[in-house]
Structure formats: C-alpha cells, structure tokens
Amino acid sequence: MTAVPFDDLAQRLTPEAAELFEEMASAHLESTGDRLFIRADSAAGTHMIFTGEGSARRFSNFDGGAVQDLLAWGLLHQGHSRRGTPNYRVTGEAVRFYRWLMQSRGTAIDQVEQQVKRVTDGAHFAEAHPGGAHHLREAFELLWSGRTDEQVVSEIGDHLRKALMDATTDLVRCDTGGQERPIQRLKAHLDSLHLPSREAEVLVQVVELARVVLRLNHRLNHIRDEADQGEPGASWEEIRRAAFATAFACYELDRLRQR
C-alpha cells in the first residue's frame, strides 16, 4: 500500500471510490470463505460477483474508475482467472484502513446516522428504488433547511410516507393489500419467506417500526389537521426522527430484497 497517512488517504479517495471501498470492505468483513470479487462486465454496466459466504451485498453499475483508484492506493489486490477475467481481494492494510475510517467517524450512533445519509444518496439504492430514493432526498433536503412551518412539515411527511410505500412495492412486487396498505403487504411477504426463527423475529420488529413510522409520517403530512384538533406542532427533532427512522426502514427492506 502506498505510504500515505490514513487521514490523508480518506481525503484523496474520490466519492465513488470511497463508496465502493466501504461496500467491498464491509462484504469482506461480514463474510467467510474465499472472499473474492470477480469482475463481470456487460453491456448493461460494470459488475462484480462476490464469492464470500454470509454477505448479501451486490456490486452492479458502479464506476469502473473507482476500482482503478482502489488498486492504485493498494486497497485491493488484483488477480486474473485462466480466461483473463480480473478479480480482486481486499488487502490486509485496507481492512485496517476501513476500521480506522469507521472509528474516525465517532460514536456508533454517529455512524448509524451517516450510514442512513449514505442511503439517501447511494447509487445502488437509487437504482433499485428510484421512487423511494427521490422521496428520501427531497425529505432530507427539507429537513436540513431547518424549517418547521406547516407547509414544509407536511411536504416532508408526504415524501417519507411515499418513500416507505415505494420501498415496500419494490420488495413485495405484488398487489397484496394494495399500494396504500404496506404493512399488510410486508407481513404477508415475510410469511412467504420461511426465514429462520431468530431472523424472522428481528424482521417482524422492522415491520413494526415501519408501521409506527408510517403513523408518524401521516401525522406530519396532516400537521394542519393535527393543529386544528389541538395537537402540538412538530419539532425539528420529531421531524428528524421520522426521517432517519424511515430511511432505516427503507434500508432494511432493500437488504431484504437482495436475499
């Protein structure tokens, strides 16, 4: 690896290379077995097949130049198959860099929020969920404006509600329960997967989170009606919580879609 301090390297990586590196390093660390990334380009774009056991991450339609950057900085080893197809492995120094990178981002809670922010801007999520990604971006742009007037709060609630419904539709891909009944559709989909009991218990709670968040998003979307009924206005913290909880639920639904 080129002898560059980690903090300097973090600044030198392009956004595309940094995003790809974090996904590849995460796949490497959460997997076992022969953790090899096999290049599989096609007319549809740049892809990689990951052979490690335990990771459901997919690598498609990323910037091919990002791989060259990672190779240049020594974060990947490159090999070739007998047919000359390139393949890559995450280097040991890259693992140390990744761990430093995660630690440099502060507490675990800070990292969760940063990961959720990445979802709203990530190329993979935007490709898989164009509608949901659009609504999340719009909601977060309004959130960071700092405004809490009824017009903005209502727009944020509408975008968050639609983002979660779109993510549900992309996962379930059927009309069970209708577009306006995402929780029933999610429950029916989970029942059809026959997941191990421990995993199923966790995902049931993710669906429960989606249900509660949808209620909160509905309140924000109809904040004027809430005010007419004597309910308190929405604080920025309440709006922030709704946005991050919605993005987290969308992220988990996307991960479930990749199974």
Image (cartoon, rainbow, N blue to C red):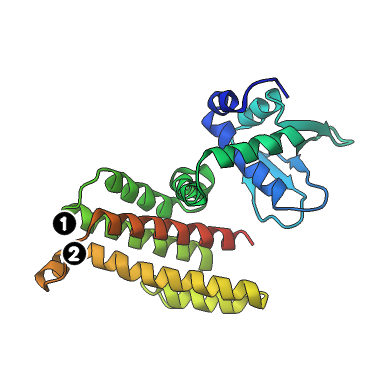
Residue assigned mark 2: 223
In the picture, measured across the screen, residue 221 lies left or right of residue 117, that is left
Q: Mark 2: few, some, or many residues within 10 Å (few <14, many ≥20)? A: many
Quadrant into which the C terminus falls? bottom right
Residue displayed at 41% across by 54% down: 131
Residue displayed at 25% across by 67% down: 219
- Mark found first going from the N terminus, 2 or 1: 1
What amino acid is at disc 2? Ile
Who is closer to the viewer here, 1 or 158? 1
Percent x, y of residue 213 = 37, 67
Task: Check the image and report above or below for 248 versus 175.
Answer: above
Who is closer to the viewer here, 37 or 179? 37
Residue 71, by quadrant, is top right
Q: Which mark is residue 150?
A: 1
Task: Check the image and report above or below for 113 versus 19.
Answer: below
| Residue 191 visible in this rendered orientation of the protein | yes
| Residue 176 visible in this rendered orientation of the protein | no
Q: CA distance from mark 2 to mark 1?
A: 6 Å
